[in-house]
Amino acid sequence: MAPSHLPTGRLVPSTALSLRVGDWVELDGRSWQVTDLRYRCDGGRIVHFGGRPPHVMGPRATIPVHR
């Protein structure tokens, strides 16, 4: 899936629960746009991206997000 626009803003650490669909996340040195979020039973999330396998986050994990 081609990005609709390039990410802007500075990178800030965000928790699994603060992520939103449409956010740009930095993983493996590349920016990925969140397309879907699913809750896990332990309070974490499964984050889906276009063109990348899902990323599993625990309830206390943080990830860099463009804000």
Image (cartoon, rainbow, N blue to C red):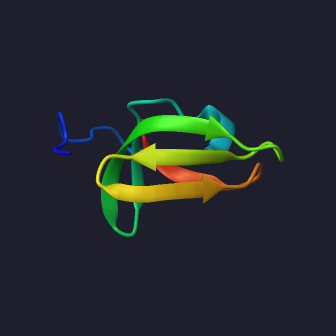
Q: Position of residue 24 (x, y in %)?
A: 37, 42
Answer whether residue 12 is visible to the viewer in this image.
no
Q: Residue at x 73, y 55 (%)?
A: 58
Q: Position of residue 8 (x, y in %)?
A: 27, 38
Q: Position of residue 42 (x, y in %)?
A: 83, 47
Q: Residue at x 18, y 34 (%)?
A: 4
Answer whether residue 43 is visible to the viewer in this image.
yes
Residue 54 or 16: which is nearer the viewer? 54
Check the picture and name the quadrant holding the N terminus. Answer: top left
Q: Residue at x 42, y 59 (%)?
A: 53
Q: Position of residue 46 (x, y in %)?
A: 60, 48
Q: Relative to residue 5, is residue 52 drawn left or right? A: right
Residue 1 or 57: which is nearer the viewer? 1
Q: Relative to residue 57, is residue 24 drawn left or right? A: left
**Residue 6 falls in which quadrant of the image?**
top left
Residue 26 or 13: which is nearer the viewer? 26
**Residue 39 falls in which quadrant of the image?**
top right
Q: Residue furthest bottom?
A: 28
Q: Relative to residue 61, is residue 37 drawn left or right? A: left
